[in-house]
Amino acid sequence: MKQMRNFLTEAKALHDSSIVLDGHADTPQRFVDEDWNWAGSPLGVGQLSSETASAGHLHGGFLIAWPEPDAWAGKFAERTRTLIAGIHQQVAKQPEAITVCTTASEVLKAKRNGQYAALIGIEGGHAIENSLDNLREFHAGGARYMTLTWANANDWCGSSGFGGDGGLTSFGRDVVREMNRLGMLVDISHVSDAAFHDVLETSWAPVIASHSSSRHICRAARNLTDDMARQLAAKGGIVMVNFFAGFLSDAWREAWNALKPERSSAIDKTREEFRVQGKPFLFFDEVAIERDFARRIPPVPFSVLVEHFDHLLSVVGPKHVGIGSDFDGIALSVEGMETAADLPKLTAALLERGWSADDLRDMLGENLLRVLKQAEDFAAA
């Protein structure tokens, strides 16, 4: 009798023989705000830790410095500095478990040494406070990409979220060129469609979408159309699929948006209770509330996440797709994708759909290493 393939076992072995990298995780807020440690601390409502990364055969990825625009108004650069410092402090505390990497070769060395390869990214161009000197400072501190906007527009780049859907200003183009010169990847997740096209026109180096899914499947404005994905790939870039249920399923997103008044009221009430008690109301306190609301909605099937990867792999080819989970920044993913420990399930499902080990090796991490090296090489030249 013919033996059936065990795709999950194959997936774990493929991860171990590859480099597996996640393009976007918001974990550094936990380092700073909760005095939470990469290894050994309880996971709580989080999704990424030393333990879940190990269980998911995940070798590294971008840890994000995100200055939330309402809470840190007027202190964007200060908050960004604090979050970057928090990543370095984790390395100082637990060097055997995690190390900061700034080059592709350092990522590979970290894997050989059994350390999580922590790359540093910045989310939201408001972080630099309209200063190229701040951009250079963050690069010197280890940052190797910047998402040009978050859901908020800034003075020089439009957003797919709120506050302006225009393109790049003249200063915005200067930011992109300076990032090219420094060797920082330009990230177009969150930007407006107009800004997307301006960035591709301006950038001399490959551009990434660090955590954006397929607009062909889910019409969320921050996902990429097939044409946008093809244009990104034509310049050597990659699109890295986001795991948030609201960017994967239109039906789930509509249900989620319908709960917004009730969610906001619950968050405001809890924030006031914390204030009265003299306790800080942290980002992960808000995530815990949002996750309770998210679980009221029927879950998105795991197959929908697989479909986003499958579609983009077909549209732009395996050399231009990657993982951009948005772990620790999202309320909920799809059914069966609770933490980084579940990542081999995704690889197993894609193997079952007929994608080869070599195809998936690129998607799992080789593509991100390639564009990182190309950015390095451009800066060196």
Image: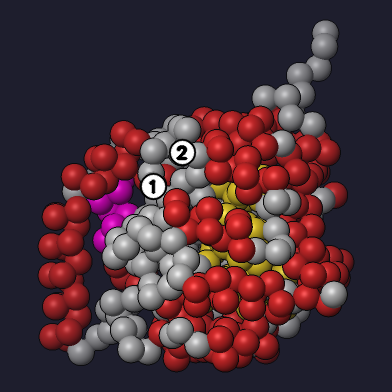
Report the residue at 53% width, 59% height from top: 198
347 vs 184: above or below: above
Q: Which amino acid does label 2 sit on?
A: Arg
Per the image, label 1 sits on a secondary structure element best described as loop
Closer to the camera in the image, 3 or 259: 259
Left or right, 378 with reference to 250? right
204 drawn magenta: no
Q: Which label belongs to residue 215?
A: 2
Q: What residue type is labelled 1?
A: Ala
131 vs 344: above or below: below
Categorize mark 2 by other alpha carbons within 10 Å: few (<14), some (14-19), many (20+).
many
Quadrant of the drawing holding the N terminus = top right
Question: Label 1 near label 2: C-beta < 8 Å?
Answer: yes
Q: Distance between the residues labelled 2 and 1?
A: 7 Å
Residue 306 pos. (x, y %): 57, 34
Closer to the camera in the image, 189 or 43: 189
Report the residue at 19% width, 45% height from top: 258
Q: Give the range drawn in magenta.
A: 288-295
Per the image, label 2 sits on a secondary structure element best described as loop
Q: Which quadrant of the structure image shows residue 53?
A: bottom right
